[in-house]
Image: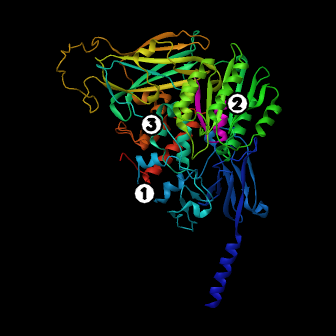
């Protein structure tokens, strides 16, 4: 008996001796910056972790095993544990030449564990989510957003329990993110409200920000989910204009997947694409936040890597200046020719974070430098990189709106790139982009930076049409009620459509824009079409209920201006009441509808009706199409992760 005990003890000792604790840092091989959220997994086991906010990781692995290190947009790397000396290895990931959907990210966030472990968390109300919108804890050595994953034993899944993150020496980011409140568009009676008018929006920030929340093991706050930005994150196969117009319009009509009795209309716009060698010279001003709040690894270091990507796209005819701000604003680099890349990159590399945040002063100086170097008939633009956390001088949202509205008269658009978490001021950055005739994107990793600044370089940097507005007139004989999905902060008064002084959204080279209307056909009984009592003091004349003899469902008008013009041009199209079967619509229609449904579910929308994560995922899978860049595959994985969060207890209620 004693011999048996000794034998078991020796075996256990040998087994423990074969387990090694490996640690190191994951880097981008090109820019030598840390990769945040890379998955490190022991092949053939459930053991996995992710690189933290500094790219660091720690993982236990047995001798003879293989580590796989993966992240979306990079080539997966495999390393034999036995080849690692001193238990330390830094990993340099190469950008993937293949499609993104060929990069398998196992254990991303806690998605795959949730799908199989069956743990539960406490219910989360929508109010709670809004209160805690800034809390996104990074996964550190198996600890995810306040959850600890215990070591797994053979035949038993890891146990997950609530823990105090500070007990591991980790301090959660401050709960100080801000989002502009969204009052969701309701159904409007077509008889009383025949006109719907709005400005287009090409911002994409909401999608990548929502992705950041879900991949960190949380559902996003409702006001972080802007459905139009979720939809327009993806590119769609639309034909560009065949004439000299800068924008072409397309429509598609079918049933709504979340309510088969309702119609779903897609309006698609496609801007003309300008060849890179025909793009006009650029006068760019990099406006970079170097305040103390930018000192985190996923802020200024990521800003530097991102801006150097953009520098690589510059031509000798292009020029760039660098303005920085912390406690005060200053000119870091005077306007410099684009072929002096080493000089520009050296100036970027020398930046350090510290001090308060005088964002307003930085904006004023950036516009001043842009005006001094203005190129007639060129591409004049400010690219601002910040977390939006201004705290010196003009810092309130209203102050920013006044400032940017005054400065935009210089005909210099502004592109806003948001970075970081915990103190992200999404509301402020959205205002700057909307009022500054620019676009807004959220950069959570180098893959997103590459998408924005390389893959979509023309669309991000070069405007082809400005002040693009849409106005739809519904035929009450065919339409009982309608609802615009998203675009809540882009709604215009009907009189604004013909007013060329009214600012609206702009489109860049090759940009696509999609807008959905959900339509309740005339004669369909529904719970959304409201009515009021007859007026007492006015005798209302009975109006005709539209043109019942016409097959026209609506008339669509859209206005736009050439970039160098102050006068708009008008285009008009009609849509016939001839819907096609949902399964016979284009891949783009079905995929975009799945994204819209997903957005409504994340918002806890009262209009989601029969929508479900299962249905959105199924539709997206069937409509993935060619997916050259892999973004649609990533969306499917994201929706599956959100479904797991809800299924395992992170429920959204409307309390």
Question: Disc 1 vs disc 2: Cβ atoms closer than 8 Å?
Answer: no
Image point 50% across, 49% down: which residue? 218
Mark 2, secondary structure of its residue = strand
User: Magenta stretch?
Assistant: 437-455
Q: Nearer the viewer, mark 1 or mark 2?
A: 2
Would residue 601 be found to the left or right of residue 410 on screen?
left
**Distance between the Cα atoms at labels 1 and 2?**
44 Å
Give the residue pinned by disc 3: 181
Task: Identify residue for label 1.
Answer: 122
Lateral position of residue 396 relative to residue 544, left or right: right
Magenta stretch containing residue 566, yes or no? no
Compare marks 2 and 3 and give the one earlier in the sequence: 3
Q: Secondary structure at mark 1?
A: loop
User: Is residue 287 or residue 6 the one in the foreground?
Assistant: 287
Tag 2 residue: 286
Q: Between marks 3 and 1, how big is the CA–CA gap?
A: 25 Å
User: Is residue 235 something that shows in the picture?
Assistant: no
Cα–Cα gap, marks 2 and 3: 30 Å
Q: Specify whether 240 is left or right of 253.
A: right
Q: Callout 2 environment at 10 Å: few (<14), some (14 to 19), or many (20+)?
A: many
Task: Please tell me how crowded label 3 is: few (under 14), some (14-19), or many (20+) other residues with Cα within 10 Å.
Answer: few
Q: Is residue 449 magenta?
A: yes
């Amino acid at each position: 008996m004693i011999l048996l005990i000794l034998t078991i003890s020796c075996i256990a000792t040998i087994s423990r001796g074969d387990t090694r604790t490996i640690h190191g840092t994951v880097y981008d091989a090109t820019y030598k910056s840390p990769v945040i959220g890379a998955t490190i997994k022991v092949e053939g086991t459930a053991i996995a972790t992710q690189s933290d906010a500094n790219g660091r990781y720690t993982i236990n692995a047995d001798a003879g095993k293989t580590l796989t290190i993966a992240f979306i947009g990079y080539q997966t790397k495999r390393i034999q544990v036995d080849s690692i000396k001193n238990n330390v290895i830094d990993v340099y990931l190469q950008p993937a030449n293949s499609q993104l959907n060929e990069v398998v990210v196992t254990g991303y966030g806690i998605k795959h564990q949730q799908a199989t472990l069956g743990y539960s968390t406490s219910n989360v109300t929508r109010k709670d989510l809004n209160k805690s919108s800034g809390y996104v804890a990074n996964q550190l050595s198996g600890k995810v957003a306040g959850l600890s994953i215990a070591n797994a034993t053979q035949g038993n899944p890891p146990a997950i329990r609530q823990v105090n993150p500070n007990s591991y020496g980790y301090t959660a980011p401050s709960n100080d993110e801000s989002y502009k409140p969204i009052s969701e568009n309701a159904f409007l009676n077509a008889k009383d409200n025949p006109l719907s008018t709005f400005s287009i929006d090409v911002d994409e920030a909401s999608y990548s920000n929502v992705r950041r929340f879900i991949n960190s093991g949380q559902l996003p706050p409702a006001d972080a989910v802007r459905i139009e930005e979720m939809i327009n994150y993806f590119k769609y196969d639309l034909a560009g204009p065949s004439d000299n117009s800068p924008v072409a319009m397309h429509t598609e009509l079918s049933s709504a997947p979340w309510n088969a009795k309702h119609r779903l209309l897609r309006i698609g716009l496609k801007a003309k694409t300008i060849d890179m060698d025909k793009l006009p010279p650029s006068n760019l001003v990099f406006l970079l936040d170097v305040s103390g709040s930018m000192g985190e690894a996923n802020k200024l270091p990521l800003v530097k890597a991102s801006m150097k990507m953009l520098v690589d796209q510059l031509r000798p005819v292009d020029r760039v200046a660098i303005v920085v701000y912390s406690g005060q604003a200053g000119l870091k680099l005077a306007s410099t020719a684009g072929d002096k890349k080493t000089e520009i990159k050296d100036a970027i590399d020398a930046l350090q974070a510290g001090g308060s945040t005088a964002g307003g002063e930085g904006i004023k100086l950036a516009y001043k430098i842009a005006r001094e170097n203005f190129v007639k008939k060129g591409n004049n633009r400010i690219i601002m990189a910040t977390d939006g956390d201004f705290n010196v001088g003009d810092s309130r949202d209203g102050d920013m709106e006044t400032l940017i509205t005054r400065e935009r008269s210089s005909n210099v658009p502004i592109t806003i790139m948001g970075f970081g978490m915990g103190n992200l001021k999404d509301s402020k950055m959205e205002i700057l982009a909307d009022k500054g005739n620019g676009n807004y994107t959220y950069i959570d990793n180098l893959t997103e930076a590459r998408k924005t600044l390389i893959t979509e370089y023309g669309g991000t940097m070069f405007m082809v049409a400005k002040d693009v507005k849409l106005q739809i007139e519904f035929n009450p004989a065919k339409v009982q009620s309608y609802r615009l999905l998203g675009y809540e902060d882009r709604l215009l008064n009907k009189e604004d459509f013909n007013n060329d002084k009214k600012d609206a959204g702009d489109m860049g080279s090759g940009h696509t824009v999609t807008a959905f209307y959900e339509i309740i056909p005339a004669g369909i009984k529904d719970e959304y079409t409201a009515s009021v009592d007859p007026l007492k003091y006015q005798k209302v004349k009975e109006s005709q209920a539209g043109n019942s003899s016409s097959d026209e469902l609506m008339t669509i008008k859209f206005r736009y201006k050439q970039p160098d013009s102050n006068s708009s041009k008008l285009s008009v199209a009609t849509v016939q009441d001839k819907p096609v079967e949902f399964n016979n619509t284009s891949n783009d229609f079905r995929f975009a509808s799945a994204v819209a449904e997903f957005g409504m579910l994340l918002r806890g929308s009262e209009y989601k009706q029969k929508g479900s994560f299962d249905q959105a995922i199924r539709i997206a899978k069937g409509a993935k199409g060619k997916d050259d860049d892999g973004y649609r595959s990533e969306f499917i994985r994201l929706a599956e992760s959100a479904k797991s969060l809800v299924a395992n207890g992170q429920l959204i209620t409307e309390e």
